[in-house]
Amino acid sequence: MRSNPVRITIVLPILCLTLLAGCARIMKPPPPTAETALVPIAGDALPSFADDLNYDGLADALTQSLTYLATLPPDKLFQYGPDQVSARQVIQSLTVFRAALKTRPSAAALNQFIRSKFRIYRSAGKEESGSVLFTGYYEPSLKGSRVRQGRYQYPVYGRPADLITVDLGRFREKYKGQRLVGRLAGDRLVPYYDRTQIDDHHALDGKAPILAWVADPVALFFLHIQGSGKIYFNDGGYINAYYRATNGHPYRSIGRLLIDEGAILKENMSMQAIRAYLEAHPGRIQEIFNTNPSYVFFVSRKDGPFGYLNVRLTAGRSLATDRRLFPPAALTLVETEKPVVDASGQISRWIPFSRFFLNQDTGGAIRGAGRADLFWGNGAYAETVAGHLQHPGHLYFFVLKSGQ
């Protein structure tokens, strides 16, 4: 019996498409590792090295990274993509770069200096595209009270006494870098209380210190997202509240929730848009907050703000990346866009910029080689850019060549 040639003609393309689709799924790039997150580049792949702030604040940020590195064994190794670099080499890199800044080099001199003395790496970016999504964070200011009274009804919690963090790498090498956060229930370790249990069912009563009581639950939620801020008391004085720990639950974006619901258009999404929606729908505030089970606990410090490396962050010079992938304290170059704000505080346009940052922080939502978060300090401009920055760009890392 002869095969039907028409059927064969139809089936073969479908079969080929099916196989190709299967191959596409199989050939999808694996998740990045510390060995693949940075790619060495040279020649025409190098960017034009420039700094839109004319190096202002950069020496201070470099000093903060050097302060952190000085606490480590000199032979401790960091992964710069395929290369391992010692803490000693990173210290030398930052020291040489800081010394060069004293001359305020021209753009041409800066490019010649970096190209001749440094090895350059580019972030592999999202799915090895080289593109990095940049967002921003800032240090918010809240109004508070030392005691619960009047409109001050929302607690800022310190680390609970029963919170337990388990470093799994101490038990099995294959779990290195992973951890569990929980509490003891009898002789069992169970997940820690989530946001609903804490806010709606008062699970932390008597278990955690309260640093302050604040009046605005939306501002408090944003403090959890930003990780640090200043709380000004109604009787005078203030405290710096900084990230101390989390409850170990995954971070869920309420912005994504509101986009999925159709409450805010994706192109209009910003921190300011979220606040406006919540203020217009006060009855939904806690319901929306509870979709993010993650909860942050704080500590009060005199100075700051401080990042993951426990050194002071520098406004416009510190950035947060995935600490599993990128070397801490490292010198970087960021290429993306920043807003121009008019006299009324509104964004009039976005312009490209290039600037040196130090990798000094991390964040629960900053995951993968295609994400980075820029710290903008405090004040109106910082809040505006942190609330709206969601722009692609490129991220580069530097380390001194051997023998320099």
Image (tube, grey):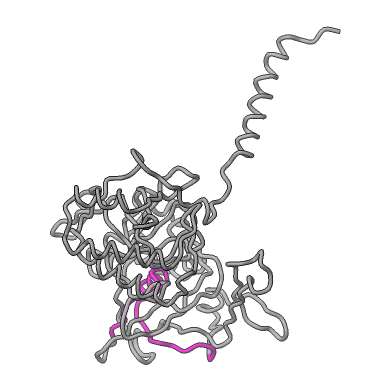
Q: How many marks?
A: 0
Q: Quadrant of the C terminus?
A: bottom left
Q: Which residue occupies 35% across, 48% down?
A: 393
Query: Residue at horizontal 45%, vertical 79%?
Result: 244
In the foreground, 168 or 181:
168
- Examine the structure image and report whether residue 355 is included in the region drawn in magenta: no
- Identify which residue is drawn at 22% across, 63% down: 381
Camera-side residue of 355 and 111: 111
> Does the image show residue 366?
no
375 shown above or below 49: below
Pick whichever, 285 or 402, lies toward us. Answer: 402
Q: Position of residue 180 (x, y in %)?
A: 61, 72
Q: Residue furthest left?
A: 343
Q: Position of residue 386 (x, y in %)?
A: 31, 61
Quick check: 206 above or below 380? below
* Direction from residue 358 to residue 237 in the image, left or right: left
Q: Position of residue 118 (x, y in %)?
A: 34, 53
> Which quarter of the figure is the N terminus placed in?
top right
- When the figure is inspected, residue 374 is found, relative to residue 238, above or below; the finding is above
Q: Residue at x 35, y 65 (%)?
A: 92
* Residue 368 location (% of width, % of height): 49, 55
Highlighted magenta segment, given as a residue range: 206-232
Queried whether the magenta region covers residue 227, the answer comes back as yes
Q: Quick one: 223 or 187, which is closer to the camera?
A: 187
Task: Please say whether residue 273 is visible from this viewpoint.
Answer: yes
| Quarter residue 269 falls in | bottom left
Residue 222, quarter of picture: bottom left
